[in-house]
Amino acid sequence: MSDLHPISKAIRIQTPRTQQHEHSTPLYLTSSFTFDEAESMRAAFADESDDNIYSRFSNPNVDEFITKMCMLEGVDDGFATSTGMSAVFSSMLALLQQGDHLLCCSSVFGSTFTVVTKYLPRYGITCTLVPANDEAAWEAAVQPNTKMVYLETPTNPQLEVIDLAWAGAFSKKHNLILNVDNCFATPLLQKPAEYGADIIVHSATKWIDGQGRVMGGIIIGRADLVKEIYLFCRNTGPSLAPFNAWVLSKSLETLDVRLQRHCENALKIAETLQDHPQVAWVKYPFLPSHPQYEIAKKQMTSGGGILCFEIKGGLEAGRKFLDALDMLSVTANLGDSRSIASHPASTTHSKLTDKQRAAVGITPGLIRISAGLEKVEDIIADITQALEKSAV
Ligand SMILES: *Cc1c(COP(=O)(O)O)cnc(C)c1O
């Protein structure tokens, strides 16, 4: 087993078979686990054995998912959570305390932004938001009490790419914990630990599930930090449900083949839209016109399944575009086998003023496309006909 390629291991790692000799891992829908003797129960509680005690702490289905994710990311240990946001929140709360300071990239997932700007300050953890690629601003923002750097790359939805080699060196120089949200790339396209990330978080709801079925998240990384996170989570309860873990572990068997098609489709859509008269600009990490194209090529094996573009005609054209789509889904998810379109200015970011939206990089006609697994000709045909109907 140890000689296998990681892609094969993601398919072959499996919970030891029971006396039923099942081929696929069974579902361990159990809240707790039994002990034959008081002594073995005592030892489990004393951390002298790895025996499962209670599914808030550990569960075979959840452990199988964690084992695969640690192997793929090339890290020691992890804890799987109910959602991506419980992973983000727990990774911060478990490692930071009152008086600590966090450096966070200014373009991060919306709920992450709310956590670091609204909730963490309530507990005396302050945060400075720093623009993605302004290295001088990151240097200037370091304080004596700074403890963690948090970023995602590529960012959602603007697809900014941050140089992980730079982020790793910067964090090391200032002795900071580097915490990277690797949701958009997945470990198959990018491995932050190779650049010095100490903690990696994921929303498994997206590409890892890949079919829009279950919520899930995971925190993985350096064993000493994960130990703290494990104790925090074991006591506060954001654990992943065994059923969802079973689905997510199965999905890791197909992640490689799915991502190949997602990335291929996204690149073709991006290339086609570049020349469309209704489109002002297209952004995709593996298009040479992307501002951080060189960095993306260096740290990612493929450009990912998400692209975005600016439709001419702003807010009104964006709304018309969503209404004119026949096949693409209009929904708040991404990373699905079905292609999805979204228009942040009229939905997720509609409560902000134009100026506030501009500050977080949301232009009025920004459309985000999550490229699905349909035939790319069908996806392009739908986007093209909707563009024609959305001229204002
Ligand atoms: C969706 C998402 C999250 C949050 O994940 P949930 O599973 O929805 O809680 C965090 N980070 C990024 C980049 C995401 O896209």
Image (cartoon, rainbow, N blue to C red):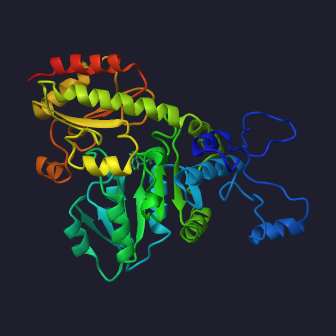
- Residue 138 location, x and y as percent? 25, 69
- Residue 222 location, x and y as percent? 54, 66
**Res. 268 image quadrant:** top left
- Residue 294 location, x and y as percent? 27, 49
Q: Check the image and report above or below for 336 versus 12.
A: above
**Res. 41 image quadrant:** bottom right
Asked whether the viewer can see residue 122, the reply is no
Residue 188 lies left or right of residue 330; in this view the side is: right
- Quadrant placement of the C terminus: top left
Q: Check the image and report above or below for 121 versus 84.
A: below
Asked whether the viewer can see residue 223, the reply is yes
Which is more toward the observer, 235 or 12? 12
Residue 131 lies left or right of residue 261; in this view the side is: left
Please identify the residue farthest to the bottom as the structure is shown: 144
Number of disc labels:
0
Q: Residue at x 89, y 67 (%)?
A: 38
Q: Residue at x 52, y 57 (%)?
A: 219
Please identify the residue farthest to the front as the structure is shown: 3
**Res. 195 image quadrant:** bottom left
Q: Residue at x 62, y 40 (%)?
A: 8
- Residue 56 location, x and y as percent? 65, 56
Residue 161 lies left or right of residue 250; in this view the side is: left
Q: Check the image and report above or below for 254 versus 348.
A: above
Which is more toward the observer, 65 or 30? 65
